Amino acid sequence: MLTLVYNKGGALGTNFGSSAAYLISSILILAFVLYYTFVNRNNPRLAYALSFITGGAIGNIIDRLRLGHVIDFLDVDFFNIDFLGYHLDRWWTFNLADAAITCSIIYLLAYILFFSRQRKVTTEKELPKQ
């Protein structure tokens, strides 16, 4: 469904401070991600994922600067969650920037856990012995 939600807090409906605090933290995190993207610009697997995070962050920052909040509009009713006393009836409303950031973070976690070690092992084996 398309549902208009003005999100003054953070991801997943969190509200740990003012919108200005979220704006400042978003800008600081964006600076870190931009630096890490520049450092890894020759590794397309990392660069593309970090670029999606950068784009999503910039989109949300523009909303916060322009409106004082982020506009969320994608309302997807997935299954309910009951896990160790935690109950969730409705999934959070989100936007395309949130989806890009979330999917990229999941990809980066999988890359770090499963592929970065494998790459290091193969490069160490390929180095000539001295």
Image: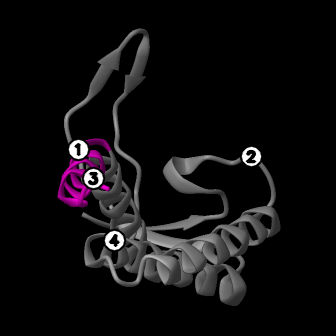
Q: Which mark is residue 16?
A: 2
Q: Tell me where the magenta segment starts and ends, as one range.
A: 113-130
Circle nearer the N terminus (1, 4): 4
Q: Which residue is mark 4?
A: 49
Could you say which quadrant of the image residue 99 lies in? bottom left
Q: Which residue is mark 1?
A: 114
Mark 1 lies on a secondary structure that is helix
In this orientation, which residue lies closer to the viewer: 23 or 106?
106
Circle nearer the N terminus (2, 3): 2
**Given the image, on which type of amino acid does mark 4 rest?**
Ala
Coordinates of residue 126 in the picture (x, y in percent): 18, 59
Residue reaching furthest top? 84
Q: Residue 111, relative to residue 25: is it above or below?
A: above
Q: Nearer the viewer, mark 1 or mark 3?
A: 3
Could you say which quadrant of the image residue 97 lies in? bottom left
Using residue 127 as the reference point, say whether residue 52 is left or right of it.
right
**Given the image, on which type of amino acid does mark 1 rest?**
Phe
Circle nearer the N terminus (2, 4): 2
Q: Residue 32, relative to residue 120: is it above or below?
A: below
Using residue 32 as the reference point, say whether residue 98 is left or right of it.
left
Coordinates of residue 53 in the picture (x, y in percent): 44, 72
